[in-house]
Image (cartoon, helix red, strand yellow):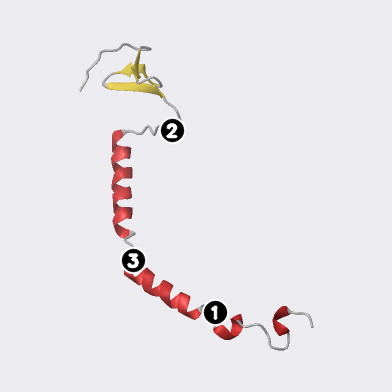
Amino acid sequence: MLVLSRKTNESIMVGDNVEIKIVEVKGEYVKLGITAPRSIAVHRKEIYEAIKKENEAAAQTSHVDEAKIEEKLKGFQEKNKPTQEKDKPDKDNNGGKKT
């Protein structure tokens, strides 16, 4: 862990596009200002941990039973399979030929 000392209005850069600025020091609390691209999520650690926990729980409950899906798909395909009678041209129509 890198430990740095900063005064109010001083900053720390993380990479080229994340700036962490000391906004205020009041007692044992420090206010930080963070400038980062919108593509980078910035959360307090306790919020990050809660999000991570919820995502893990959601991933476990959304288990997909592939065998059941395959079985249902085969049943659907069988029900919707075209019959040979439907595919044959009408005899009255001469198969679309002009006479």
Label 1 and label 2: CA atoms lie apart by: 49 Å
Q: Earlier in the sequence, mark 2 or mark 3?
A: 2
Image quadrant assignment for residue 88: bottom right
| Quarter of the image where the C terminus is located | bottom right
Q: Residue furthest bottom?
A: 92
Q: Name the mark nearer the viewer: 1 or 3.
A: 1
Circle 1: is it few (<14), some (14-19), or many (20+) Cα within 10 Å?
few
What's the residue type where badge 3 is placed?
A: Glu
Q: Residue 31 at x, y = what percent?
A: 35, 22
Q: Nearer the viewer, residue 57 or 81?
A: 81
Circle 2: is it few (<14), some (14-19), or many (20+) Cα within 10 Å?
few
Q: Is residue 29 above or below residue 61?
A: above
Residue to which mark 1 is pinned: 82
Image quadrant assignment for residue 28: top left
What's the residue type where badge 1 is placed?
A: Pro
Q: Residue 85 at x, y = what percent?
A: 59, 86
Q: Name the mark nearer the viewer: 2 or 3.
A: 3
The structure residue drawn at horizontal position 54% and vertical position 83%, both measured from the top left corner, is 83
Residue to which mark 2 is pinned: 39
Label 2 secondary element? loop
| Quarter of the image where the N terminus is located | top left
Decide: marks 1, 2 in contact (CB < 8 A)? no
Image quadrant assignment for residue 59: bottom left
Q: Earlier in the sequence, mark 1 or mark 2?
A: 2
Q: Residue 25 at x, y = what percent?
A: 32, 17
Is 31 displayed left or right of 77 in the figure?
left
Q: Nearer the viewer, residue 48 or 7?
A: 48
Residue to which mark 3 is pinned: 66
Q: Residue furthest right?
A: 99
The structure residue drawn at horizontal position 44% and vertical position 27%, both measured from the top left corner, is 37
Q: Which mark is residue 34?
A: none
What's the residue type where badge 2 is placed?
A: Ser
